[in-house]
Every structure is written in C-alpha cells, then in structure tokens.
Image (cartoon, rainbow, N blue to C red):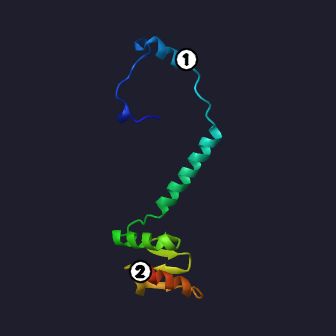
C-alpha cells in the first residue's frame, strides 16, 4: 500500500524507456505470506497492548503515574483505578495514601510507594 502523500508523479508504461519496460516484465520476488501474517499478528498484538495501557477518562497526571509504575511493575487500568500485578490498587488522586493492598503483598506495596514518592 502507498500513501497518496508520497506519490510525486505517475508514469504510464507507454512513457517508459526500453530498459524500464524490460524491468517491468521481470517477475516479482517471492513473499512468504505466512511470515507476513505472523508479523501482522504480532504488530496488532503489540498495538492492542499499548492501547490497553492508556487510561480512558483519566488525567494526564494519572497517565504519567501509570506509566511510571508500569516501568517497574506490570499494571493495568480497571476503570480509573491502577491495578499493579493484581495486588495493589491505586485510586484517584493516585498518591501513596490512595493505595490498597491484598494481604501478603506488602513488598509490592513498598515498591509502588517508592515509585510514587519519586
């Protein structure tokens, strides 16, 4: 596919010189469709993962906090709350005092507090 923005001019076969016409008659190189499908699937999966990491209806500050925590600990959005590896939940306004923790996950909470404090 080509974006029309990149097309500078269109030349028809009638306007080509003999050398260019000979090159046009060469067969196209082999393209492994299985490999291209795999690359497409991987790209779509990565795009979905990036899209899932963008909070809906949250402030820029909330997104910045999510991104900071997500650098060290995997996070996900659950509505407007940040959930860190299913153990720590950070609710608005996303400060240290707004963290709740599942029993036995105090180490994760300590790591989240370090990130939020910096």
Q: Is residue 90 left or right of residue 105?
A: left
Residue 68 - label: none
Q: Nearer the viewer, residue 35 or 49?
A: 35
Q: Which residue is mark 1?
A: 25
Up the image or down, 39 lies above or below 103; here it is: above
Up the image or down, 61 lies above or below 98; here it is: above
Q: Residues within 10 Å of mark 1 (few under 14, many from 20)?
A: few
Q: Residue at x 43, y 69 (%)?
A: 67
Q: Dot 1: what SS?
A: loop
Q: Which residue is mark 2?
A: 116
- Residue 101: percent from left, percent from top: 52, 85
Residue sitting farthest toward the front: 19
- Residue 25: percent from left, percent from top: 55, 17
Find residue 116 and report its image quarter: bottom left
- Between discs 1 and 2, the one toward the N terminus: 1
Q: Is residue 118 left or right of residue 75?
A: left
Q: Residue at x 35, y 25 (%)?
A: 9
Q: CA distance from mark 1 to mark 2?
A: 63 Å
Q: Residues within 10 Å of mark 2 (few under 14, many from 20)?
A: some
- Residue 11: percent from left, percent from top: 39, 19
Q: Residue at x 47, y 17 (%)?
A: 20
Q: Dot 2: what SS?
A: helix
- Asked if the residue at tag 2 contacts the one at tag 1, i.e. Cβ–Cβ closer than 8 Å, the answer is no
């Amino acid at each position: 596919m080509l974006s029309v923005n990149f097309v500078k001019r269109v030349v028809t076969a009638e306007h080509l010189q003999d050398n260019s016409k000979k090159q046009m008659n060469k067969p196209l190189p082999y393209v492994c469709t299985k490999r291209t499908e795999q690359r497409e699937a991987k790209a779509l999966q990565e795009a979905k993962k990036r899209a899932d990491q963008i909070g809906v209806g949250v402030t820029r500050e909330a997104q910045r906090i999510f991104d900071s925590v997500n650098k060290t600990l995997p996070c996900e959005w659950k509505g407007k709350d940040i959930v860190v590896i299913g153990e720590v939940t950070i609710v608005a306004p996303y400060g240290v005092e707004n963290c709740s923790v599942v029993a036995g996950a105090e180490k994760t909470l300590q790591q989240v507090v370090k990130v939020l404090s910096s």
